[in-house]
Image: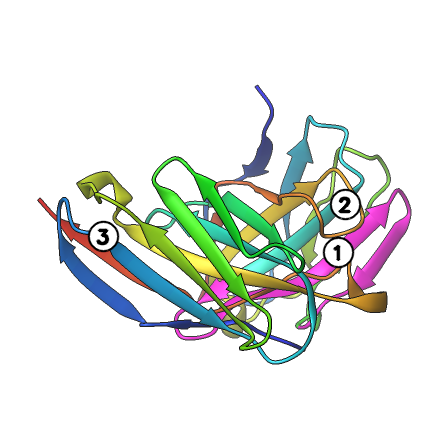
Amino acid sequence: SQQGEEDPQALSIQEGENATMNCSYKTSINNLQWYRQNSGRGLVHLILIRSNEREKHSGRLRVTLDTSKKSSSLLITASRAADTASYFCATVPSGAGSYQLTFGKGTKLSVIP
Amino acid sequence: EAQVTQNPRYLITVTGKKLTVTCSQNMNHEYMSWYRQDPGLGLRQIYYSMNVEATDKGDVPEGYKVSRKEKRNFPLILESPSPNQTSLYFCASRSSIWANSPLHFGNGTRLTVT
């Protein structure tokens, strides 16, 4: 099944810096979603971006989508220690399989105070 | 408060002893799903349900059973657990059967099978 792949696997930054995580996928999508997971807890939905959208914002989060390159990025601006978590992209295929969501393996972000 | 509730949070059991992990959502969601999360393997779907009495296999269904007798509940059953089912399990739900709305996750069940 199609799977997004996040890059990098791990990222360590100082508080106040920006954090950028990337997601690549292989086939056409209906939408792409980003989730956050604090250590050992349930995932929390951050942003959904549809295939006809190029950019979405939510607070300090900015998501871009480039369907020609089959990639998405999540930017967290002015990071805080509380942003320390794993971040996952999840893709929804276009067409008949648009009820299925497939997760990547995540980027582990550490924000150092 | 809108939520997905899983129980128990932690479970230690022995090989072969049947167990059930409960999942309940109070949002009247159509779609429910179970995932397992393992280091290096990410989140993998076990089973999902689009409606009452409608369940289907995900990517890793072997060794698991589910049922959806009521809209709010979606228990995960391990008839004969084995050590390779030691994992972190998540139940999730969303309002639409189509994946164009957010998934809401429970807080997880950490299962250890010895």
Q: Amino acid at mark 1?
A: Tyr
Secondary structure character of the magenta stretch overall: strand
The residue indicated by pointer 2 is B31
Chain name for mark 2:
B
**Percent x, y of residue B24:** 67, 34
The residue indicated by pointer 3 is A18
Q: Can residue A105 be seen in this snapshot? A: no
Tell me the crowding category of disc 2: few under 14, some 14 to 19, or many 20 or more residues within 10 angstroms, Cα based: many
Q: Are marks 2 and 1 in contact (CB under 8 Å)?
A: yes
Q: Amino acid at mark 3?
A: Asn
Q: Is residue B48 magenta?
A: yes
SS for tag 1?
strand
Q: Are marks 3 and 1 in contact (CB under 8 Å)?
A: no
Q: Nearer the viewer, mark 2 or mark 1?
A: 2
Region of the chain picked out in magenta, as a range: B37-59
Side of B25 relative to A39 (left or right): right
**Viewer-proximal residue, A9 or A28?**
A28
Q: Amino acid at mark 2?
A: Tyr
**Percent x, y of residue A30:** 71, 61
SS for tag 2?
strand
* Residue lying farthest to the bottom in this orientation: A26
Numbered label attached to residue B48 = 1
Q: Residue at x 59, y 76 (%)?
A: A68
Q: Does B101 sit above or below residue A69?
A: above
Q: Is residue B53 magenta?
A: yes
**Percent x, y of residue B61:** 71, 69
The answer to which image quadrant residue B38 occupies is: bottom left
